[in-house]
Image: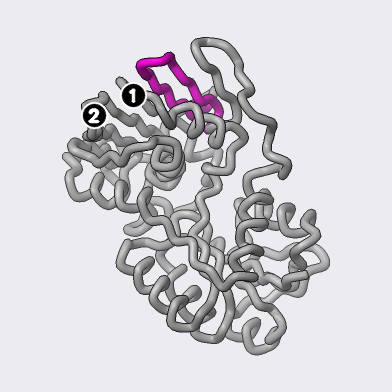
Amino acid sequence: MIKVALVGIGKIAIDQHAPAITNSSEWELSATVSRRGKLPGIPAFSDFDTMLASCPDIRVVSLCLPPVPRFAYAAKALRLGRHVMLEKPPGSTLSECHALRAIARTNRLALYATWHAREANKIAVAKAWLKNKRLHKIKVIWKEDVRRWHPDQQWVWEPGGLGVFDPGINALSIVTEILPDSIYITESSLEFPANRQTPIAASLRFAHPHGADATMILDWRQQGTQVWTIEAKTDQGKLLLLDGGAQIQIDGQDTILTDDHPLSGEYANLYTRMAQLVADGGIDMDLEPMRHVADAFTLGHRMTVDPFEW
Protein backbone atom coordinates (compact mmCIF):
# COMPACT_ATOMS: atom_id res chain seq x y z
CA MET A 1 0.00 0.00 0.00
CA ILE A 2 1.10 3.56 -0.70
CA LYS A 3 1.44 5.74 2.38
CA VAL A 4 -0.03 9.23 1.96
CA ALA A 5 -0.18 12.35 4.10
CA LEU A 6 -3.25 14.53 3.81
CA VAL A 7 -2.44 18.22 4.24
CA GLY A 8 -5.24 20.66 5.04
CA ILE A 9 -8.02 19.02 7.03
CA GLY A 10 -11.05 21.01 6.01
CA LYS A 11 -14.45 20.13 4.56
CA ILE A 12 -13.20 18.65 1.28
CA ALA A 13 -10.53 16.55 3.00
CA ILE A 14 -12.99 15.18 5.56
CA ASP A 15 -15.90 14.63 3.18
CA GLN A 16 -14.05 13.33 0.11
CA HIS A 17 -10.32 12.65 0.40
CA ALA A 18 -10.26 10.72 3.67
CA PRO A 19 -13.06 8.28 2.71
CA ALA A 20 -11.53 7.71 -0.73
CA ILE A 21 -8.17 6.84 0.84
CA THR A 22 -9.45 4.68 3.68
CA ASN A 23 -11.78 2.72 1.39
CA SER A 24 -9.00 1.95 -1.10
CA SER A 25 -6.88 -1.19 -1.15
CA GLU A 26 -4.01 0.80 -2.71
CA TRP A 27 -3.62 3.55 -0.11
CA GLU A 28 -2.86 3.98 3.58
CA LEU A 29 -3.64 7.31 5.25
CA SER A 30 -0.56 7.64 7.43
CA ALA A 31 -0.59 11.26 8.62
CA THR A 32 -2.45 14.55 8.53
CA VAL A 33 -1.17 18.11 8.68
CA SER A 34 -3.43 20.92 9.85
CA ARG A 35 -3.41 23.77 12.34
CA ARG A 36 -6.75 22.66 13.76
CA GLY A 37 -8.28 19.66 11.98
CA LYS A 38 -7.65 16.02 12.84
CA LEU A 39 -8.96 12.63 11.78
CA PRO A 40 -9.66 9.89 14.33
CA GLY A 41 -6.85 7.37 14.66
CA ILE A 42 -4.49 9.12 12.23
CA PRO A 43 -1.17 10.65 13.42
CA ALA A 44 -1.67 14.40 13.32
CA PHE A 45 0.92 17.11 12.79
CA SER A 46 0.50 20.86 12.99
CA ASP A 47 3.72 21.55 11.09
CA PHE A 48 4.50 20.33 7.55
CA ASP A 49 8.29 20.25 8.02
CA THR A 50 7.93 18.16 11.16
CA MET A 51 5.74 15.64 9.35
CA LEU A 52 8.19 15.32 6.44
CA ALA A 53 11.11 14.82 8.80
CA SER A 54 9.23 12.38 11.04
CA CYS A 55 7.70 10.26 8.28
CA PRO A 56 10.34 9.40 5.65
CA ASP A 57 8.29 6.38 4.59
CA ILE A 58 5.37 8.53 3.42
CA ARG A 59 5.82 8.67 -0.35
CA VAL A 60 2.86 10.86 -1.33
CA VAL A 61 1.57 14.21 -0.11
CA SER A 62 -2.01 15.14 -1.02
CA LEU A 63 -2.59 18.87 -0.68
CA CYS A 64 -6.07 20.13 0.21
CA LEU A 65 -4.93 23.61 1.21
CA PRO A 66 -6.35 26.82 -0.30
CA PRO A 67 -4.63 27.76 -3.58
CA VAL A 68 -2.36 30.56 -2.32
CA PRO A 69 -0.17 28.60 0.16
CA ARG A 70 -0.24 25.40 -1.91
CA PHE A 71 2.79 26.12 -4.09
CA ALA A 72 5.26 26.36 -1.22
CA TYR A 73 4.08 23.06 0.25
CA ALA A 74 4.11 21.27 -3.10
CA ALA A 75 7.54 22.58 -4.08
CA LYS A 76 9.03 21.56 -0.73
CA ALA A 77 7.53 18.08 -0.91
CA LEU A 78 8.80 17.52 -4.46
CA ARG A 79 12.29 18.74 -3.62
CA LEU A 80 12.37 16.30 -0.70
CA GLY A 81 11.45 13.38 -2.96
CA ARG A 82 7.71 13.06 -2.31
CA HIS A 83 5.09 12.60 -5.01
CA VAL A 84 2.41 15.31 -4.92
CA MET A 85 -1.33 15.32 -5.56
CA LEU A 86 -3.07 18.69 -5.83
CA GLU A 87 -6.69 19.52 -5.06
CA LYS A 88 -8.26 21.81 -7.66
CA PRO A 89 -7.26 24.40 -8.68
CA PRO A 90 -3.63 23.19 -8.74
CA GLY A 91 -2.30 26.64 -7.79
CA SER A 92 -3.13 30.30 -7.49
CA THR A 93 -1.42 31.15 -10.81
CA LEU A 94 -0.46 29.40 -14.02
CA SER A 95 3.18 30.31 -13.41
CA GLU A 96 3.17 28.39 -10.12
CA CYS A 97 1.78 25.32 -11.88
CA HIS A 98 4.42 25.44 -14.61
CA ALA A 99 7.10 25.77 -11.94
CA LEU A 100 5.79 22.73 -10.07
CA ARG A 101 5.76 20.69 -13.25
CA ALA A 102 9.41 21.60 -13.88
CA ILE A 103 10.40 20.62 -10.33
CA ALA A 104 8.57 17.29 -10.61
CA ARG A 105 10.20 16.55 -13.95
CA THR A 106 13.67 17.39 -12.62
CA ASN A 107 13.19 15.12 -9.62
CA ARG A 108 11.43 12.39 -11.62
CA LEU A 109 8.41 12.41 -9.37
CA ALA A 110 4.67 12.04 -9.92
CA LEU A 111 2.60 15.22 -9.95
CA TYR A 112 -1.17 15.22 -10.40
CA ALA A 113 -3.40 18.25 -10.87
CA THR A 114 -6.77 16.71 -10.09
CA TRP A 115 -10.11 17.76 -11.57
CA HIS A 116 -12.65 15.79 -9.58
CA ALA A 117 -15.65 17.00 -11.60
CA ARG A 118 -14.33 15.13 -14.63
CA GLU A 119 -14.87 11.90 -12.70
CA ALA A 120 -18.62 12.46 -12.34
CA ASN A 121 -20.69 9.49 -13.40
CA LYS A 122 -21.72 10.55 -16.91
CA ILE A 123 -18.80 12.71 -18.09
CA ALA A 124 -17.22 9.92 -20.14
CA VAL A 125 -20.62 9.16 -21.68
CA ALA A 126 -21.09 12.80 -22.68
CA LYS A 127 -17.60 13.00 -24.18
CA ALA A 128 -18.18 9.87 -26.29
CA TRP A 129 -21.59 11.13 -27.51
CA LEU A 130 -20.24 14.54 -28.57
CA LYS A 131 -17.14 13.17 -30.30
CA ASN A 132 -18.39 13.01 -33.90
CA LYS A 133 -21.15 15.62 -33.79
CA ARG A 134 -21.23 19.23 -34.91
CA LEU A 135 -21.87 21.52 -31.98
CA HIS A 136 -24.39 24.35 -32.46
CA LYS A 137 -24.70 25.60 -28.88
CA ILE A 138 -23.40 24.90 -25.42
CA LYS A 139 -24.82 26.63 -22.37
CA VAL A 140 -23.44 26.14 -18.87
CA ILE A 141 -25.29 27.27 -15.73
CA TRP A 142 -23.44 26.75 -12.43
CA LYS A 143 -25.27 28.28 -9.48
CA GLU A 144 -24.63 27.33 -5.89
CA ASP A 145 -24.69 28.75 -2.38
CA VAL A 146 -21.27 29.80 -1.09
CA ARG A 147 -22.59 29.69 2.47
CA ARG A 148 -23.40 26.00 2.11
CA TRP A 149 -20.17 24.88 0.45
CA HIS A 150 -17.63 27.26 2.02
CA PRO A 151 -19.04 28.13 5.45
CA ASP A 152 -17.06 31.00 6.98
CA GLN A 153 -14.05 30.32 4.72
CA GLN A 154 -12.54 33.75 4.21
CA TRP A 155 -9.81 32.64 1.78
CA VAL A 156 -12.30 32.29 -1.09
CA TRP A 157 -12.75 36.08 -1.01
CA GLU A 158 -9.04 36.94 -0.89
CA PRO A 159 -6.71 37.43 -3.89
CA GLY A 160 -5.90 34.00 -5.28
CA GLY A 161 -9.05 32.47 -3.79
CA LEU A 162 -10.88 32.70 -7.16
CA GLY A 163 -14.30 33.54 -5.72
CA VAL A 164 -17.08 32.05 -7.83
CA PHE A 165 -14.45 30.45 -10.06
CA ASP A 166 -13.66 28.02 -7.23
CA PRO A 167 -16.80 26.06 -8.23
CA GLY A 168 -16.80 27.53 -11.74
CA ILE A 169 -13.50 25.86 -12.55
CA ASN A 170 -15.31 22.55 -12.06
CA ALA A 171 -17.63 23.47 -14.93
CA LEU A 172 -14.64 24.55 -17.02
CA SER A 173 -12.89 21.26 -16.30
CA ILE A 174 -15.92 19.35 -17.60
CA VAL A 175 -16.37 21.48 -20.71
CA THR A 176 -12.70 21.19 -21.66
CA GLU A 177 -12.95 17.42 -21.18
CA ILE A 178 -16.11 16.66 -23.15
CA LEU A 179 -15.80 19.03 -26.12
CA PRO A 180 -13.82 17.65 -29.07
CA ASP A 181 -12.71 21.19 -30.03
CA SER A 182 -10.88 23.79 -27.98
CA ILE A 183 -12.68 27.03 -27.11
CA TYR A 184 -11.49 30.30 -25.64
CA ILE A 185 -13.07 33.24 -23.83
CA THR A 186 -13.96 36.37 -25.78
CA GLU A 187 -16.18 38.19 -23.27
CA SER A 188 -16.24 38.21 -19.47
CA SER A 189 -18.38 40.12 -16.97
CA LEU A 190 -17.46 39.78 -13.30
CA GLU A 191 -19.56 40.88 -10.31
CA PHE A 192 -17.53 41.81 -7.22
CA PRO A 193 -19.19 42.42 -3.86
CA ALA A 194 -18.28 45.90 -2.65
CA ASN A 195 -16.44 44.43 0.34
CA ARG A 196 -14.67 41.50 -1.34
CA GLN A 197 -11.62 40.92 -3.54
CA THR A 198 -12.99 38.10 -5.72
CA PRO A 199 -16.17 37.81 -7.83
CA ILE A 200 -19.44 36.37 -6.62
CA ALA A 201 -20.84 35.91 -10.14
CA ALA A 202 -19.58 35.78 -13.72
CA SER A 203 -20.92 35.68 -17.26
CA LEU A 204 -18.65 34.29 -19.98
CA ARG A 205 -18.81 33.94 -23.75
CA PHE A 206 -16.48 31.70 -25.76
CA ALA A 207 -15.29 31.44 -29.34
CA HIS A 208 -15.74 28.01 -30.93
CA PRO A 209 -13.79 26.97 -34.07
CA HIS A 210 -17.00 26.03 -35.92
CA GLY A 211 -19.06 29.00 -34.75
CA ALA A 212 -21.09 27.34 -31.99
CA ASP A 213 -22.72 29.65 -29.45
CA ALA A 214 -20.91 28.95 -26.16
CA THR A 215 -21.79 30.66 -22.87
CA MET A 216 -21.38 30.12 -19.13
CA ILE A 217 -23.18 31.65 -16.15
CA LEU A 218 -21.66 31.32 -12.68
CA ASP A 219 -23.34 32.54 -9.50
CA TRP A 220 -22.52 31.99 -5.84
CA ARG A 221 -25.77 33.45 -4.49
CA GLN A 222 -28.06 30.53 -5.29
CA GLN A 223 -30.51 29.59 -2.56
CA GLY A 224 -32.57 26.43 -2.47
CA THR A 225 -31.91 23.96 -5.30
CA GLN A 226 -28.33 24.05 -6.52
CA VAL A 227 -27.90 24.17 -10.29
CA TRP A 228 -25.04 22.49 -12.16
CA THR A 229 -26.13 21.97 -15.77
CA ILE A 230 -24.45 21.77 -19.18
CA GLU A 231 -26.67 21.79 -22.26
CA ALA A 232 -25.22 20.97 -25.69
CA LYS A 233 -27.20 21.21 -28.93
CA THR A 234 -25.71 19.43 -31.94
CA ASP A 235 -26.63 18.48 -35.50
CA GLN A 236 -27.70 15.08 -34.13
CA GLY A 237 -29.67 15.98 -31.02
CA LYS A 238 -29.39 17.59 -27.60
CA LEU A 239 -27.42 16.50 -24.58
CA LEU A 240 -28.09 17.68 -21.04
CA LEU A 241 -25.76 17.01 -18.13
CA LEU A 242 -27.40 17.49 -14.73
CA ASP A 243 -26.11 17.63 -11.15
CA GLY A 244 -22.57 18.37 -12.29
CA GLY A 245 -22.44 15.35 -14.58
CA ALA A 246 -24.05 12.79 -12.28
CA GLN A 247 -27.01 12.44 -14.66
CA ILE A 248 -27.40 12.72 -18.42
CA GLN A 249 -30.33 13.19 -20.77
CA ILE A 250 -30.21 12.87 -24.55
CA ASP A 251 -33.12 14.36 -26.47
CA GLY A 252 -35.04 14.63 -23.22
CA GLN A 253 -34.65 11.02 -22.19
CA ASP A 254 -32.53 9.61 -19.37
CA THR A 255 -29.89 7.63 -21.19
CA ILE A 256 -27.20 5.09 -20.35
CA LEU A 257 -24.88 4.57 -23.32
CA THR A 258 -22.19 2.59 -21.52
CA ASP A 259 -21.83 0.64 -18.31
CA ASP A 260 -21.21 2.76 -15.25
CA HIS A 261 -17.60 3.19 -14.28
CA PRO A 262 -16.56 0.21 -12.14
CA LEU A 263 -15.10 2.55 -9.51
CA SER A 264 -17.48 4.39 -7.25
CA GLY A 265 -17.03 8.07 -6.55
CA GLU A 266 -15.09 10.92 -8.08
CA TYR A 267 -12.28 10.95 -5.50
CA ALA A 268 -11.84 7.18 -5.55
CA ASN A 269 -11.09 7.53 -9.25
CA LEU A 270 -8.59 10.32 -8.58
CA TYR A 271 -6.63 8.21 -6.12
CA THR A 272 -6.63 5.27 -8.52
CA ARG A 273 -5.11 7.57 -11.15
CA MET A 274 -2.55 8.89 -8.64
CA ALA A 275 -1.47 5.34 -7.82
CA GLN A 276 -0.79 4.80 -11.52
CA LEU A 277 1.25 7.99 -11.72
CA VAL A 278 3.31 7.00 -8.67
CA ALA A 279 4.04 3.63 -10.26
CA ASP A 280 5.08 5.25 -13.54
CA GLY A 281 6.65 8.45 -12.18
CA GLY A 282 4.26 10.35 -14.44
CA ILE A 283 2.94 13.90 -14.52
CA ASP A 284 -0.72 14.74 -15.19
CA MET A 285 -0.93 18.53 -15.16
CA ASP A 286 -3.75 19.68 -17.45
CA LEU A 287 -4.02 23.46 -17.04
CA GLU A 288 -6.80 24.20 -19.55
CA PRO A 289 -9.43 25.03 -16.89
CA MET A 290 -7.02 27.46 -15.22
CA ARG A 291 -6.21 29.09 -18.56
CA HIS A 292 -9.87 29.97 -18.96
CA VAL A 293 -10.04 31.44 -15.46
CA ALA A 294 -6.98 33.57 -16.15
CA ASP A 295 -8.55 34.79 -19.40
CA ALA A 296 -11.80 35.58 -17.60
CA PHE A 297 -9.96 37.85 -15.18
CA THR A 298 -7.86 39.42 -17.96
CA LEU A 299 -10.90 40.26 -20.09
CA GLY A 300 -13.28 40.81 -17.21
CA HIS A 301 -15.56 43.83 -17.19
CA ARG A 302 -15.78 44.54 -13.45
CA MET A 303 -19.08 45.45 -11.83
CA THR A 304 -19.54 46.26 -8.14
CA VAL A 305 -22.57 44.68 -6.46
CA ASP A 306 -24.01 44.58 -2.94
CA PRO A 307 -21.59 43.65 -0.15
CA PHE A 308 -21.46 40.00 0.86
CA GLU A 309 -21.91 39.06 4.51
CA TRP A 310 -21.88 35.59 6.01
Residue at image position (52%, 63%) is 112
Q: Can you tell which mark lies on residue 210?
A: 2
> Mark 1 — residue?
134
- Left or right? Give the position of 15 relative to 293: right
Magenta range: 226-244
Q: Residues within 10 Å of mark 2 (few under 14, many from 20)?
A: few
What is the residue that sits farthest to the front in this orientation? 132
Indicate the position of residue 118 as horizontal and vertical percent values: 52, 43
Please state which amino acid type lies under the numbered disc 2: His
What is the residue that sits farthest to the top in this orientation? 252
Asked if residue 158 is positioned above or below residue 226 in the image, the reply reads below
Q: Are marks 2 and 1 in contact (CB under 8 Å)?
A: yes
In magenta segment, residue 239: yes
Residue at image position (48%, 34%) is 127
Indicate the position of residue 248 as horizontal and vertical percent values: 56, 23
Asked if residue 271 is positioned above or below residue 95 in the image, the reply reads above
Q: Toward which corner of the image does residue 179 lie, by quadrant?
A: top left
* Circle 1 SS class: loop
Q: Can you tell which mark lies on residue 31?
A: none
Q: Can see residue 273?
A: yes
Please state which amino acid type lies under the numbered disc 1: Arg
Asked if residue 51 is positioned above or below residue 110 in the image, the reply reads below
- Magenta stretch, main secondary structure, is strand
